Amino acid sequence: MPSLALAPPRTIVDRAALATALGRIVGDRWVRHQASELRTFSADGLPTHQSMPMLAVLPGTREELIEVVRHLHRSGIAFVARGAGTGLSGGALADAHTVLIPLTRLHRILRIEPKTKRAVLEPGVVNARLSEAVAPYGLQYAPDPSSQAACTVGGNVAENSGGPHCLKYGVTTNHIVELEVILPDGTVTRLGSPHGEPWGPDLVGLFVGSEGMFGIAIEITVRLVPLPQAVRTLLADFMAVRSASEAVGAIIAAGIVPAALEMIDQACVKAVEASIYAAGYPTDAAAVLLVELDGEPVEVASDGASVERLLLAAGARTVRSATDPAERNRLWQGRKKAFGAMGRLARDLVVQDAVVPRSALPDVLDRITAIGQKYALTICNVFHAGDGNLHPNICYDGRDAELTERVRAASREIMQACVDAGGSITGEHGVGSDKLDFMPWIFDATSLRMMCDVRRVFDPAGRANPNKVVPVFACREWRAGGVS
Amino acid sequence: MNQAIFDRVRTLLGSASTGKSGDGIAQAAPDSTDGISATLALAKNEGWRVRIEGRGSWMPPNAPADLVVTSLGLDRVVKFAPADLVATVQAGISVAALERALTEGHAWLPIDAPGRPDRTIGSVIATGTAGPLREGFGPVRDHVLGCTTVTGDGQVVKSGGVVVKNVAGYDLNKLQAGGFGAFGLLTEVNIRLRAVPASDLTLIAQGGRDALTAEARRVIETKIDPGALELLSPAVAADADWVLAVRLIGGAEGVRSRAKQIRHDATVSWTALTGDQASALWHGAARAFLSGATTIRLGVLSESLDEIIDLVAEHLDLGLLSAGTGKGGLRWSGEATVEHLTRLRHVLAAREIPLTLERAEWKLRHAFGHFGAYREGVGAVVSRLRSTFDPGAIFQVPLDGTAVDG
Ligand SMILES: Cc1cc2nc3c(=O)[nH]c(=O)nc-3n(C[C@H](O)[C@H](O)[C@H](O)COP(=O)(O)OP(=O)(O)OC[C@H]3O[C@@H](n4cnc5c(N)ncnc54)[C@H](O)[C@@H]3O)c2cc1C
């Protein structure tokens, strides 16, 4: 029987010789192999997962990247692409048998085409920098992860990232029209077309969200959208989380699609207000809703009035509204700085990510509170309420093993509650290595095996970002067990 | 008809789900995903070639096959959650029946596919045939949250989920939307819906093509977010002239204001249609494409629209043509030979524009292929994907074509 394993090869590697060979391609100073140098690359913002790579190689040009991947292919060595390392799911981590390829030096915006509303860029371009670069043309790159000041568009492509404004504008997959990719065997190919019609089956759609396991995106063509004519931001505070959740449903049911619809709960508001980022959110409110409308001015004004009515009808105590940029920024401040503020509460912060049907929000939020109480943990929620994408955050001290275990158990129970409500284990951070165990909760053995098989189409040897997304050893067992 | 195949299928599914196709081939119409799975597993084991069919109103149902498997036994709304604006429906439900069911829950699926309203939703998704609403609401794939697919060896694969945002696992939905059934038979889909809009207004301008494409570019610059902004040839619009039609969807005040903005500084004269007139225009345009034997679509952006329409005119004709002028996408229907289409595909490929064959008689489809020449390296990936989803190569789906030299 041929080997069906998708597990990474465990080639015996002479690390020093490999470093020398890769140094010849990228220059010695761009190969990192000391433990002190590699520590920077040992995590991706999720404190529960850490791993030291064999070494890290940082190509500075497209050609160097291609040469590096081809060299690793010839040597049979596994690799992990890495953007800014903000993934939060243990996705961009490599182990001692695996080479890490940070792409942050590939940070050039190659072309901006205002007429066709396209930009072509290298994968290491930081998300916010792209929107800054196209703003003078009256355009924006719509997907705006809260980490946009740091995360790379290559990472966004791999994770199919979302962000507050993706409620109206769609997530990364809706904004990528063409990708140049290098497959793990060194083949370079172009998927999609700049015209937005897939060229053949939708391989761009398939590649986006593949978490670095199909190959590396080396050139990305994005669709840009015009900056809106008018923007209005509303901030409403509620004395009950349930009322805030119901307001979310009422707005969507009214046929209004806000640009953003975010919820911040009391624990999170308190953290923000106690920090240097204090935004004037009422700390006695059970939850705060932030609603942003954008588009044609009259429509924004009339939808704004409707949203205000719906918020008050659902029980909002007060509704503040702003249209000028400075005032709007103030309303957003608490949301934008929430992670920073929570990060100050304790040494470590687990940011979780799950999705539930909108109508299940009130019950699931109650359930999360109960889970927090059961494990004696404070769970703060700041999340994309409009699409039911929850981010329960748990502050803790990772040096305390017993506490860390409780955090793990609570995270697991929260995921189970979301799945029980008909939801998913991740809305935007990806499965990475963090959620491997949960995949069988939402996909049966056949569907998971098909994912393994599709991965094999791009990467027969399983060398790109091994051991992520689909539990591969289980996959092997299903095959051996003859599941069909 | 091959009686032996008919008998085997009847034994498997029972008489009620077994019949004969219009062209005399044994036909299976299972009423469950499990039934489809058992049928395809049998076909794979027996080495039968399988034709997947919906209503047969869009794609001519004439691929040579040993067995026809139709989705028409799968015509139910499985679950509809108006509060979440999602629904799970079987692939054989007609677009019209689906629309009726959704309206009861004040929901709406913004896909206005070409063809007849009795087309199955599975056919719309599998062929990725978006209509003019693609401008405001995205291509077909954007409305698909999850799929249940049966592969060519009878495996039941689920992808995606029922929530509107989801990145768990690889996005296999994307292979099904626009995969022409090469990657399996869709049995169930989870779709994302919208609340029925308060206001839906269509404005049209009639005139010469150049004047209208120039006006379309001006409208795009006004940033009024149209639901559709479509240029229709006289034959598609059933009009003496070319027609530029804009569909404004949203709150009443906003729609009125956007209509005013369009008229302000207009270079052509705009007329607002009544609800009935608008419905007649859009439905008529959708059906018009059926009067040509062959339908193709191209990805075209507004900047190159004039030039590409000229190319289509040069290689084919300007009979049945419509083009989304904002986000792109041009559809043409008519009579075409493989040679003409091949030449056009090559000319377009040089401009990095893909040409997809949406529908045609089997002979042409088989020779020309839905996608034909791929970019370098892509063909190998596509063929490996095909053998993953259809290891016995039972599905009669000509993605690549035989007559194209690449
Ligand atoms: C405070 C904070 C807030 C966040 N908010 C959001 C949010 O609102 N929405 C959201 O979606 N995410 C959010 N995230 C998660 C994270 O920022 C995104 O997933 C982001 O896309 C990761 O980008 P990165 O450059 O850091 O990628 P990394 O973490 O470095 O890598 C992520 C994955 O991408 C792969 N990869 C990287 N580059 C490439 C490439 N060129 N080709 C192929 N694979 C590649 C890696 O192998 C890895 O699997 C947040 C994170 C933090 C820390």
Image (cartoon, grey):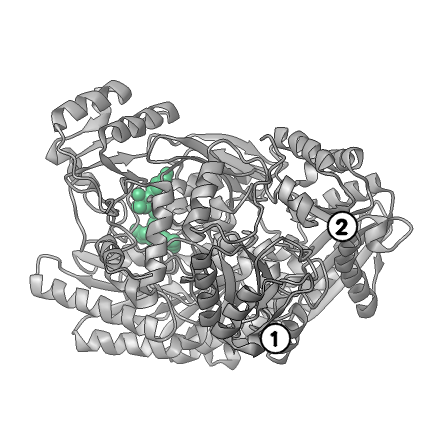
Q: In this image, B122 relative to A94: left or right? A: right
Disc 1/disc 2 C-alpha distance (Å): 32 Å
Q: Is residue B179 visible?
A: yes
The three-letter code of the residue at mark 1 reads Leu
Quarter of the figure with residue A115: top right
The residue at 86%/55% (across/down) is B238
Q: In this image, A28 relative to A224: left or right? A: left
Which subunit holds the residue at mark 2? B
Q: Which residue position is annotated with label 2? A: B293
The three-letter code of the residue at mark 2 reads Ala
Give the image location of residue B76, x and y in percent: 56, 76
User: On screen, A312 above or below B269?
Assistant: below
Number of marks present in the image shown: 2
Q: Is residue B32 visible?
A: no
Q: In this image, A479 relative to B285: left or right? A: left
Mark number for residue B102?
A: 1
User: On screen, B76 above or below A325?
Assistant: below
The residue at 43%/80% (across/down) is A243
Q: Residues within 10 Å of mark 2 (few under 14, many from 20)?
A: some
Identify which residue, A477 or B317, lies in the foreground.
A477
Give the image location of residue A122, x and y in percent: 42, 33
Give the image location of residue B6, x and y in percent: 56, 68
Identify which residue, B137 or A183, lies in the foreground.
A183
Element assignment for label 2: loop
